[in-house]
Amino acid sequence: MNRTVSFGLLAGLVALLAVAVWIVVDGVGDGPDARTHVRAGLSAAEALAGSDTAGFARAMAPRPFEFPRDHGPHPDYRTEWWYLTGNLESDGGRPFGFQLTFFRSALSPTAPDRPSAWNTNQLWMAHFALTDIEAGSHIVGERFARGAAGLAGGQAEPFRVWLHDWEIRGLDDSGAFPMVLEVEQEGVELRLELDEGKGPVPQGIDGWSQKGPEPGNASYYLSWTRMPTRGHVTIGGDRHTLRGNAWMDREWSTSALGEANTGWDWFSLQLDDGREVMFFELRRDDGEPDPMNHGSLVGVDGEARRLGAGDVTLEVLDRWESPVDGALYPARWRMQIPDEELDLTITPRVADQEMVVSFRYWEGAVTVDGTSGSGPVGGLGYVELTGYAEDGGTRGAGSGSE
Amino acid sequence: MSLQFRAGFRHLLRHPWNLLLPVLGIALGVAVTVAIDLAIQSSREAFRVSSETVAGRATHQIQGGVTGVADSIPALLLRETGVRALAPVVEGWGSHPSEPDRPLRLLGIDPFSEAPFRPYLAGGPGAEVDGTRLLTERGAAFVSRATADRLGVAENEAFTLLVGGGLVELRLLGVLEPEDEWSRRGLRDLIVVDLSEAQAVLGRGGELDRIDLLLDEAVADSVLERIRAVLPPELRVEPAGSRERTMEEMVRAFDLNLTALSLLGLVFGVFLIYNTMTFSVVRRRRHFGTLRALGVTRGGILKSVLGEAAFLGVAGSVVGVLLGILLGRGLVRLVTRTINDLYFVVSVEGLALPPDVLLRGGLLGIFATLLAALPPAWEATSVSAREALARSTVETRVRALIPVAAGIGVGLLGLGGALILLTERSLGAAFTGLFAIIVGAALVVPILTIVLVGVLRPLLRRTVGILGAMAARGVVTALSRTAPAVAALVIAVSVTVGLGVMIQSFRGSVVQWLDVTLQADLYVSAPGGVSARAEGSLPEGLDELARGLPGVVGVSTYRGAEFDSDYGRTRLVGLDLDPRGEDAFDVLERMGGLSDEGLFERFRAGDGALISEPFAFRHDLSAGDTVRFASARGPAAFPVLAVFRDYGAEMGTVMIGRVAWDRGWDDRRITSLGIFLEPGASEGPIEAGLRSGSGSELLEVRSNQELRQLTLEVFDRTFEVTRVLRLLAFLVAFVGVLSALMALQLERSRELGVLRANGMTPGQTWGLVTAQTGLMGLVSGILALPLGLLMAVIMIHVVNRRSFGWTLEMTVSPMLLAQAVGLALAGALLAGVYPSWRMARTSPAEALRDE
């Protein structure tokens, strides 16, 4: 009997121990290492892309532009940008390309009612890229901030558009030009002074640029096509004094692209004969050229001639495969403008100028060579290609682009 | 299994009371320590998980000063210092109206800054929080699945939250479901809103609580230097987690107090084991003699007895750990509530079960058991094969040991006393001293018992007769068994006396303090708030409104803020003191040569500070010293005009005149008002006037009496844990006494059989047993009083002072002492019921039959 009892007791103890162990094991959660599995990711692309246009101002017709007011933001429109690109060269002849863009996006037609300096409906995004053409490198930066509490914003007088410490501003209080650009990213520091040069050039019809057939699918679009630029860049600890020409696009809209657009190819070319070409091609999901495609040819005197969809032919000569996921981008073009007797070959100065940011696109410095009439013509420029990568959007404007 | 082990276990099994009571005793002792340990660890763990989840991957933090961190600082840092990743945070506490006691953390973030810090809060594709909607929709909020379920709110539904500023309506936009347990736990009771929403809801426009920074290690030093150069003087940049460490530091004394109390439970468990093992060894002397004759070595006997003890220890510890988990579930709520009342807000869901705590509790039980069994086991080995000693020799030996034990006891008492008297601030020394005194007292108990019984014996003989004298004799002659029982009872009762007196004195001191402090007739504060402390700020101009109401003769305004200063977490108060409120300060120490008038004149002029006693103690400050703070306008120094009595804030409070506050900070807010009325003016119309005039129906307006009542309720709440522990300690001791007395009486069955055979009636037998247990109870009760009072003195003047920095007036109510003696007597008598019933019932022949 005793043996039975002691076995019983022993069994009981074992059972108790088992219960205790179970409770202990059950209570032990995942440690901090599991934190790494938390899904990461931040992109305002989604925010930039919303499709509900109700309540926002629309670009329905041409309008007069007034400065300095129109250098500042137009917060009633959903999307707006200050888009600066340029090809520069150091004293020693070393070539660089740069891009600095401030995107403003109104996330809703009005801001909610909150007594707080952080309250806003405006979200800002900025992209920066520096192409070190000799080294073949392409440095990219991206930032987001709400347009509140001094983190980011824009103002016409005195002119200033900024996100954190990236900034463009008027050199003095007298106006937007000469314009100072300051940006720092991963040890790269760029500081430029840009004169107004040629501009503003109104694109489309007096600066009203229609992108889709529906009314209001248009933007207000002005370009400064040749801005004499000087300044310096510090890269890899070396400081280079720079000179060259920049290009600034100012554009604001609420919805631009039509339903059928999958992306666009955009060209800004500064020819060495003193003329500039802007042309964009909206790509459609049926592969047909979009009748909305247009551009302009700016003469030496600054007078712009509008280029319609039929005035320009573009042929892709080469393709480049993104190392990220194998997305295929066009990489060399033949552009013909028969009326102007222009036959140009456009070649990226560095193949990989893909902007691997929260939505991917390709934006890079290009060289131009070809013929104008019977004589040779060369030049430099920037090309933007959107909608090629899986997660690529369109220049911030893309409603219904994917 | 060897012979002696089998014999030992069979012995245990044949005497189930010998098995069950010690197992129960050990189990209870272990359970109390484990439960307290678990409760403490759970509250710590909850605090850590929530602060770490909320702190995210920050490497540094900028902590707000009195008025938080200004809105403009993040942009400044991003522009001027090379900081790339920062996240501004506004935090507040609220609760759901259905569960006002359960704090919910309102976390205001900038979703577009969050990606490097708290990816699950960053707004964008793939993230869980829709930053766009947070930014653009009023009331937009995200919570975890568990919190959503608890609040009973579905996605896109509105819900109400009670926060400092009143009731606010939020809308649940979505549910956060991090994939890992860690983040899930951290998100418990967390409501994520946009910064702007948090500022709006909390009424804190213009200020942030902190800024999280992520600095690249390589450049951290140079960036930090630049940050310090541009930061306003009152802001501090510190490594992440330093604030949490400060917070944990604050509760350390509290935790230590609880742990020490819980160890008392185990001490009783050890007594119990000692008692049981001694008893069973004494009882089996003949048996051990036989084993020795059979060739079992001394070592074998030692092992066998220790084996039995180990069995009891393991069984008791396992049961104890399980019981501790059950008990811990209840205790964690009490502990958490106390932390919320006294220190900071923490929300604990369920009990954490760290294996090390359970293991520690279990091992403590087993080792304590073995330790307690060592002396009796040694005793068992001393039985020689030849002799089957009679008890009388044992008792003779025990008697011889009594003076030795008493000597050691006196030594321990002296050591404990010295430890306490010779140290000034060490809490560890105080508790070690206290324990030495308890053990020392236990060792002195037997000799005192002999003396006391000697005194009582003639008395008993006269009142109860021969049976009384016999009972008294029995206590002394069976000292080997009665002494541990009496000692255990003495300790148990003295602990209840000590804790009881301490709690009573504390409460008395608080009541007295409240009578002095609450001078105004009405107190007004912002509604809500999770803890008892006033939070939030009053509608602007309420003080002027109050001054203008008929019947109001004076108003004091009060602005309190907690922030990190050079003194650690500090409560700074800007006080606009009405002259009628001057009596509210119970001044303990004042600057030399300062009259009452002069003191308050200087205080009002902003020339000096009043500091609370705990603050003075913690930072070793006295009147005449200087306290320094970094104000928004640079360093500010205040001579300490006086130290005042205060039980309101454990971390300590510094009060400066409102003039000084306004000089240092650009902050016009008021946290609460004290309103003085004309004699005979009624409170109702004033309250109504304040509500209608300010348009805030939710203002908390309390009369002097209501606030006093509320404060005492909080006080009583914070001592609930102590009360529970006191009860548990007594319960363990009672089981010990029960087991000792029962074993003692059952073992006497032979002796009682003889008495019965010689003509003692069952009634007389019952009387004898009852008289004897009653006598032991009485002796314990009497001896427990001085020890209990001594413990009370130590806890009041040493432990509390060293833990919290305040002095208490000791008050002893005779009622409490009478209760203690009664408790000891009742406990002992109760323990005698079963044995005496059984003895009285057993026929003499049965009792005389050998085992």
Image (tube, coloured by chain):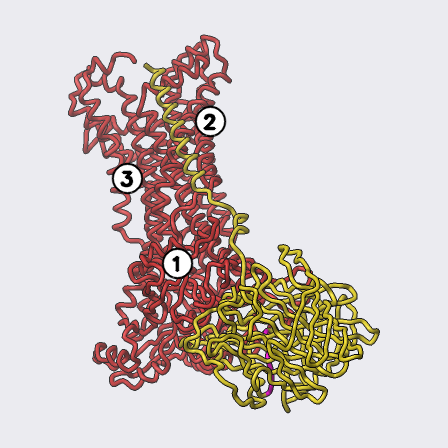
Chain ID for yellow: A
Report the span colored magenta: A158-163
- Judge whether A93 appears above or below B347 on screen: below
Callout 1 crowding tier (Cα within 10 Å): few <14, some 14–19, many ≥20: many
**Taking the image as drawn, is residue B391 in sight?**
no
Q: Give the residue pinned by disc 3.
A: B824
B266 or B476, which is in the foreground? B266
Residue name at image x 60 percent, y 73 percent: A164
Residue name at image x 54 percent, y 90 percent: A64
Q: CA distance from mark 1 to mark 3?
A: 36 Å
Please identify the quarter of the rendering in which residue A303 is found: bottom right
Q: Give the residue pinned by disc 2.
A: B374
Of the numbered discs 3 and 2, the one sitting upstream in the chain is 2
Q: Give the residue pinned by disc 1.
A: B340
Q: What's under tag 1, amino acid-wise?
A: Asn
Q: What's under tag 2, amino acid-wise?
A: Leu
